[in-house]
Structures are given as structure tokens and as C-alpha cells.
Amino acid sequence: MRRQKRRFHIRKKVRGDQARPRLAVFRSAKHIYVQAVDDDKGVTLVSASTREKDVVGQIKGYTGNRTAAGVVGKVVAERLKNMGIEQVSFDRGGNRFHGRIKALADGAREAGLRF
């Protein structure tokens, strides 16, 4: 319930468009998913998760930890940079900014995204 309240509070303020998409994060117990969304058109530009074969190949072992989240952050940043996008709005999905969420953000920032 608390996460949903935080999520709605965040979504009132965070918007994404073609030039600066919203980087939406979903965290489950075993995996982490992230997608860059253009809210004006209602389309997902790129996505990445710990369930993709090329991402799992870079992760050694368990997919529900900070290391895996950092790899996903780097992968989504590389895909966005290939599209020419360097700036995003970070939507943590109501999760607190620590642990895997922070690791994903740090990985994306290391790969060159600004937010």
C-alpha cells in the first residue's frame, strides 16, 4: 500500500517524451525490469531486464541482486545512447532509492545517461 502511494505521487510529476523519456523501473523478488517510455505517444522506446539472454550472459549467478541491477542499468543506457538519447526522467516505481534501484541508476549513469 505504501509503495502504491509513493508510485502515484511520483507519477503525478514525472513525464516522458521523445527527447527525454521516462525510465520506469519494476522490481520483483528475482528480477528487475526497466523500460524507457514516451508518455506523449504511449510507446516503449527500449527495455531491458534480467530475464534477457544477453543480460543473463553478463550476470554470473543470481539475478535478484545489486550486481545484476547494475548490469541492466548499463544495458538500457547503451540502448538509449544508440538511439541518440542521453537524458531521461527516472521513475523508481514507488520503490525507495536504495539497494537494487540505486544500483540500476548508478549503472545507467556510469554508461552515460543523465538524470
Image (spheres, grey):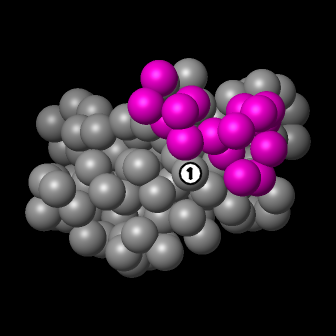
- The image quadrant of residue 45 is top left
Please state the total of marks drawn on the protein image.
Answer: 1
**In the rendered view, would you say 115 is above or below 60?**
below
**Residue found at x 53% / y 33%:** 57
Give the residue number, with chain letter if any, for mark 1.
71
- The image quadrant of residue 5 is top right
Evaluate whether residue 13 shows in this view: no
Tell me residue 49's x, y (percent).
Answer: 52, 32
Amino acid at dot 1? Val
The one nearer the camera, 58 or 101, is 58
Give the side of residue 97 with respect to residue 19, left or right: right
Disc 1 crowd rating (10 Å Cα; few below 14, some 14-19, many 20+) is many
Please say whether residue 78 is one of the residues in the magenta stretch: no
The one nearer the camera, 1 or 51, is 51
Give the side of residue 46 with respect to residue 105, left or right: left
Give the side of residue 9 with respect to residue 15, left or right: right
> In this picture, which residue range is highlighted in magenta?
53-68
- The image quadrant of residue 104 is bottom right
Tell me residue 96's x, y (percent).
Answer: 79, 57
The one nearer the camera, 82 or 47, is 82
Tell me residue 83's x, y (percent).
Answer: 14, 54
The one nearer the camera, 19 or 109, is 109
Which quarter shows the C terminus?
A: bottom left
**Residue found at x 46% / y 57%:** 74
Evaluate whether residue 107 shows in this view: yes
Secondary element under disc 1, as helix, strand or loop, is: helix
**Residue found at x 79% / y 32%:** 62
Query: Furthest-right residue in view?
Result: 2
Tell me residue 113's x, y (percent).
Answer: 37, 71
Which quarter shows the N terminus?
A: top right
Give the side of residue 59 with respect to residue 47, left or right: right
